[in-house]
Amino acid sequence: MTPTALVLAAGKGTRMRSSLSKVLHPLCGRPLAAWTLQACQDAGLRTAVVVGHQAEQVKQVLGPDHGYALQAEQNGTGHAVQCAQALLADASVVVVLPGDAPLITAETLRGLLEGHGDALCTLLTFKTPEPGRYGRIIRDANGTVLRIVEAAGATPEQLAVDEVNAGIYAFDAQWLVKEVLPQLKPSPPKGEIYLTDAIEAASRAGRLRAVIHQAPEELVGINDKATLAQAEADLRARINHAWMMKGVHMRDPSTTYIDAQVVLGAEVLLEPGVILRGKTVIGDRASIGPHVSIQDSLVGPDAQIKASSVLESAVVGPRAAVGPMAHLRAGSVLGAEVKVGNFVETKKAVLGDGAKASHLSYLGDCEVGAGANIGAGTITCNYDGWGKHKTQIGARAFVGSNSSLVAPVTVGADTIVGAGSTITGDVPEGDLAVGRGRQKNLSGRAEGIHRRNAQLAGKRFDR
Ligand code: UD1
Ligand code: CA
């Protein structure tokens, strides 16, 4: 018998006004329902999901680590659990949760299970000054919970109750499956089958436990884009706090954005405005400058990413320096101690240890050998209008400023390319290549040109 979590995620989430299913909206880079599932797994529960709206897409995004049941038509929360009966055949306890409550923690779920004992149902409630659309908790004069009344069917007196149903419950799974689910009836006014009717059944049997949760902010449900944004802010604060406790120096956590899957090393420094997304990993003691955005990239130990740089699926070696204002695109791989300076863009570019491109370059579809120096303004001309071609630059090559390397082309090791060259043919190892018009000096000819231009402009030339 296995304790199981059942996450209800079949609903459409109309109030999101979104073509994307509500439960797939990302929060800190992780889909809404995946937060809840992660908390369940961390609490030691096997996980299952009821899907309906956009079922195939939801299954695909949430992945194969969970059981799935299909609720083709959304006839209410009770009906959703009926659709998942087969997944509960060997469950001891089942914790039912909504798919739109991403802030619930493993700690809270563990607490719920520990206190459950031999109750038929443990119900999690919370108090709120704005009970809104939540189901109201109805207690008798002794404080015993009798049932839950949905807002839609509540009397004015019941609507005034400030204790509400979080939609999170632990049930004796076999009791629920065998004795409750078959008995559930459609409720007015909508004719939906409510899981909340199970609470009344447990109360009648005298085996209902109700726990008032003291951290109601963990229980908020996402219904629209405003509550989505608030939940993301809360999760972001949690992530930032956890990294700071591990020694990350965050100069302004209120402007620091770190996705759930990101991994940070010891003593990383994050300046204000940093955005770290996807599967990014930052090595020990690396420093990430102001307004840097990094997606799915690896930054090596002691590397420096300077202000306003953008990295996408890139690898940066140990002690390398990038930026300010550099753009490393997919397939950029920088070795140890590489320097990529301001206004340099790289794409599918492999730079060997110690290579440098300090200013204003485009390096695409190329390999740059160790210790090579790429002068300011150098461009790999990788595209001919039809396909992409490769540039190979050997170790210790010195490419002068403002050179165009027309691919496919190979510039050998230990070569020099004269500044301003357009290189269309391979340069053998050790050669000097000059691919530009030869300079001539016309003696004293400057003054005559100035005189003529001044006259044309109607100005006097006196020098
Ligand atoms: C439900 C509770 C309410 C509680 C609130 C907490 C019922 C009858 N009411 O109301 O007491 O205060 O949650 O948030 O249970 N879902 C399905 N299939 C369905 C209907 C819903 O999978 O047929 C899923 C939804 O996708 C959602 C969750 O169940 O993730 C809750 O459904 P929702 O419609 O939001 O329930 P509420 O009306 O908010
Ligand atoms: Ca809801």
Image (cartoon, helix red, strand yellow):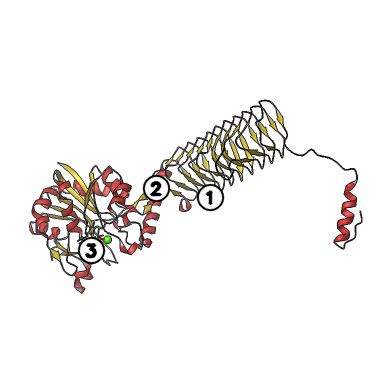
Judge: label 1 CB < 8 Å from ligand 1: no
How far apart marks 3 and 2 lie (CA) works out to: 30 Å
Q: In the drawing, what numbered circle is on residue 291?
A: 1
Q: In the drawing, what numbered circle is on residue 163?
A: 3
Of the numbered discs 3 and 2, the one sitting upstream in the chain is 3
Q: Is residue 146 left or right of residue 40?
A: left
How far apart marks 1 and 3 lie (CA) works out to: 43 Å
> Residue 390, image x and y in percent?
57, 36
Image-quadrant location for residue 372: top right
Of circles 1 and 3, the one toward us is: 1
Q: Secondary structure at mark 3?
A: strand
Q: Residue at x 41, y 47 (%)?
A: 259
Q: Secondary structure at mark 2?
A: helix
| Image-quarter location of ligand 1 | bottom left
The quarter of the picture where the N terminus appears is top left
How far apart marks 1 and 2 lie (CA) works out to: 19 Å
Q: Is residue 50 above or below residue 162?
A: above
Are the residues at dot 1 and dot 3 in contact (C-beta closer than 8 Å)?
no
Q: Residue at x 17, y 61 (%)?
A: 194
> Residue 135, image x and y in percent?
22, 64
> Residue 161, image x and y in percent?
22, 68
| Residue furthest to the top | 430
> Residue 241, image x and y in percent?
40, 47
Q: Residue at x 28, y 63 (%)?
A: 128
Q: Which amino acid type corresponds to the residue marked 2 in the rendered image? A: Ile
Image-quadrant location for residue 349: top right
Q: Which amino acid type corresponds to the residue marked 1 in the rendered image? A: His
Task: For label 3, count other residues whose C-alpha is less than 10 Å away and answer few (under 14), some (14-19) or many (20+).
Answer: many
Are the residues at dot 1 and dot 2 in contact (C-beta closer than 8 Å)?
no
In this view, the residue in front, 303 or 113, is 303
